[in-house]
Amino acid sequence: QIKACLFDLDGVLVDTAVYHYQAWKRLANTMGFDFTEVQNEQLKGVSRVESLNKILAWGGVTKTDTEKEELATLKNSWYVDMITKMTPAEVLPGTVEFLTAIHQAGYKLALGSASKNSATILERTQLAHFFDEIVDGNMVTKSKPDPEVFLKGASLLGFKPEECVVFEDAVAGVEAAKRGGMKAIGIGEKSVLTEADKVVSGLDKLTVKDLEEL
Ligand code: B16
Ligand code: MG
């Protein structure tokens, strides 16, 4: 029986992927190359360092570790400029309604995000108060598909993995949930999130009843 809900941030509660994309694109452009929206899909749910490594490989560019650190910091400064201007209007459809409903039904809630900027985003969008625990990129050493971020969330909430359901938009995130022994609700396409126990297009398509039926 499900007692706790673990939420990914980007692509599930808010659409910060557009800002990541703009900032990474700008960084690639300064190095003299570009990448497509299709390639950008591969950056979803992936950590900052790993995203940079992928982009450098696409551009056929080699950088030292120090240079990589500078590039990641530069990208992040552009990204932070954009997310500090976010408003609650950017919360994805049905999010506030669904979080309110499950909170009232007695479920515990945790965030399980790869982002090191989750605090800023949750604060700007006024979602922070829904969460009993927040686990993000600052607290984990292994990124999704490793289950660390979700196992940490479950243990902080005081529940066993089988009592938790993860809400994820990324293939790596769904894999992390399943490897951690949890249920997974995919947000996106059924053909992409094949490992998920259920797939919907957004939180606006879910009710408390869906959790009881898992
Ligand atoms: P930051 P999530 C992830 O968030 C994003 O999907 C991914 O594109 C990004 O690279 C990663 O956070 C790290 O973000 O640079 O802010 O630390 O989907 O796990 O909520
Ligand atoms: Mg995501």
Image (cartoon, helix red, strand yellow):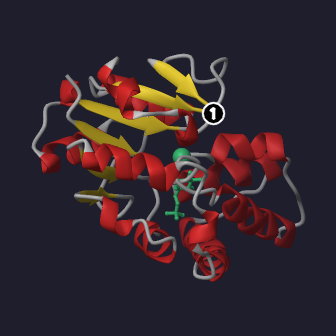
SS under mark 1: loop
Q: Quadrant of the N terminus?
A: top left
Relative horizontal placement of residue 153, taking residue 165 as reference (left or right) = left
Front residue (pair 73, 205): 205
| Percent position of residue 151, x then y | 23, 39
In the displayed image of the protein, which residue is found farthest to the left? 158
Q: Looking at the picture, does residue 97 appear above or below residue 22?
A: above
Picture residue at 36% right of the left edge, 67% below the top: 128
Relative horizontal placement of residue 149, taking residue 186 as reference (left or right) = left
| Percent position of residue 141, x then y | 32, 52
Kind of residue at badge 1:
Ser
| Percent position of residue 104, x then y | 26, 48
| Percent position of residue 88, x then y | 56, 70
Q: Which residue is mark 1?
A: 201
Front residue (pair 30, 1): 1
Picture residue at 78% right of the left edge, 47% below the top: 58
